[in-house]
Image: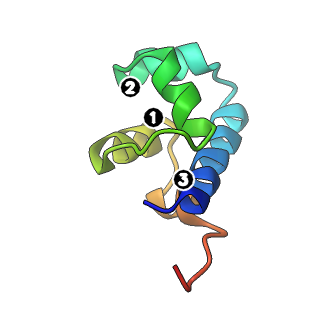
Amino acid sequence: MDKNILRILGKNIKIERIRNDLSQEQLAEKAGVSTRTISLIENGLQHPKLFLIVKISKILNVDINVFLENIPSDV
Protein backbone atom coordinates (compact mmCIF):
# COMPACT_ATOMS: atom_id res chain seq x y z
CA MET A 1 0.00 0.00 0.00
CA ASP A 2 1.26 3.48 -0.84
CA LYS A 3 2.87 5.24 2.14
CA ASN A 4 0.76 8.35 1.55
CA ILE A 5 -2.40 6.26 1.76
CA LEU A 6 -1.22 4.66 5.00
CA ARG A 7 -0.43 8.09 6.45
CA ILE A 8 -3.90 9.47 5.59
CA LEU A 9 -5.63 6.30 6.82
CA GLY A 10 -3.75 6.51 10.11
CA LYS A 11 -4.49 10.20 10.54
CA ASN A 12 -8.21 9.61 9.97
CA ILE A 13 -8.27 6.74 12.48
CA LYS A 14 -6.51 8.95 15.04
CA ILE A 15 -9.01 11.78 14.50
CA GLU A 16 -11.95 9.44 15.09
CA ARG A 17 -10.28 7.82 18.11
CA ILE A 18 -9.82 11.24 19.70
CA ARG A 19 -13.41 12.22 18.85
CA ASN A 20 -14.51 9.11 20.72
CA ASP A 21 -12.37 10.15 23.69
CA LEU A 22 -10.34 6.94 23.61
CA SER A 23 -6.64 6.54 24.27
CA GLN A 24 -4.52 4.34 22.04
CA GLU A 25 -4.44 1.86 24.90
CA GLN A 26 -8.23 1.75 25.15
CA LEU A 27 -8.70 1.32 21.40
CA ALA A 28 -6.04 -1.37 21.31
CA GLU A 29 -7.73 -3.30 24.11
CA LYS A 30 -11.14 -3.11 22.43
CA ALA A 31 -9.64 -4.16 19.07
CA GLY A 32 -7.61 -6.99 20.57
CA VAL A 33 -4.25 -5.65 19.40
CA SER A 34 -1.26 -4.04 21.07
CA THR A 35 -0.96 -0.33 21.75
CA ARG A 36 2.12 -0.41 19.52
CA THR A 37 0.00 -1.68 16.63
CA ILE A 38 -2.44 1.22 17.01
CA SER A 39 0.46 3.67 17.23
CA LEU A 40 2.09 2.26 14.09
CA ILE A 41 -1.20 2.40 12.17
CA GLU A 42 -1.93 5.97 13.26
CA ASN A 43 1.56 7.04 12.21
CA GLY A 44 1.24 5.38 8.80
CA LEU A 45 3.97 2.87 9.55
CA GLN A 46 1.94 -0.35 9.45
CA HIS A 47 -0.29 -1.80 6.79
CA PRO A 48 -3.37 -2.98 8.73
CA LYS A 49 -5.46 -5.87 7.53
CA LEU A 50 -8.93 -4.99 6.26
CA PHE A 51 -10.49 -6.99 9.09
CA LEU A 52 -8.79 -4.74 11.66
CA ILE A 53 -9.84 -1.56 9.84
CA VAL A 54 -13.45 -2.78 9.86
CA LYS A 55 -13.19 -3.71 13.54
CA ILE A 56 -11.81 -0.27 14.44
CA SER A 57 -14.58 1.44 12.45
CA LYS A 58 -17.19 -0.50 14.43
CA ILE A 59 -15.52 0.31 17.76
CA LEU A 60 -15.42 4.00 16.83
CA ASN A 61 -18.96 3.83 15.41
CA VAL A 62 -18.05 5.32 12.03
CA ASP A 63 -18.49 4.18 8.47
CA ILE A 64 -15.26 2.67 7.16
CA ASN A 65 -15.32 5.26 4.35
CA VAL A 66 -14.51 7.96 6.91
CA PHE A 67 -11.04 6.43 7.18
CA LEU A 68 -10.59 6.80 3.42
CA GLU A 69 -11.47 10.49 3.23
CA ASN A 70 -8.85 12.76 1.63
CA ILE A 71 -7.14 9.92 -0.21
CA PRO A 72 -6.40 11.15 -3.74
CA SER A 73 -8.45 9.42 -6.42
CA ASP A 74 -5.43 8.95 -8.68
CA VAL A 75 -3.71 6.34 -6.50
The residue tagged 3 is 6
- Badge 1 marks a residue whose secondary structure is helix
Q: Position of residue 35 (x, y in %)?
A: 51, 16
How packed mark 2 is, by other alpha carbons closer than 10 Å (few <14, some 14-19, many 20 or more), is: some
Q: What residue type is labelled 1?
A: Ile
Which residue is found at the position 46% from the left and 25% from the top? 37
The local secondary structure at tag 2 comes to: helix
Q: Residue 40 location in percent, x, y?
A: 54, 31
Q: Which residue is drawn at 60% across and 37% down?
A: 42
Percent from the top left, x then y, of residue 53?
A: 40, 46
At label 2, the amino acid type is: Ala
Residue 62 drawn at (x, y percent):
52, 50
Q: Residue tagged by mark 1?
A: 59
How crowded is the residue under tag 3: few (<14 C-alpha within 10 Å), some, or many (20+)?
A: many
Viewer-nearest residue: 20 or 51: 51
Q: Measuring 51% from the left and 79% from the top, which residue is drawn there? A: 75
Residue found at x 48% / y 57%? 63
Q: Is residue 44 left or right of residue 2?
A: right
Mark positioned earlier in the residue sequence (2 or 3): 3
Establish if 74 lies above or below 29.
below
Count the labels in the image.
3
Q: Hey, what amino acid is under mark 3?
A: Leu
Q: Tell which circle, 2 or 1, labels the residue nearer the N-terminal end.
A: 2
For mark 1, does the 10 Å Cα neighbourhood hold few (<14), some (14 to 19), or many (20 or more) residues? some
51 left or right of 46? Answer: left
Query: Are the residues at dot 2 and dot 1 in contact (C-beta closer than 8 Å)?
Result: yes
Say the numbered circle drawn on residue 31: 2
> Which of the two discs, 3 and 1, labels the residue nearer the N terminus?
3
Q: In which quarter of the image is residue 1?
A: bottom left
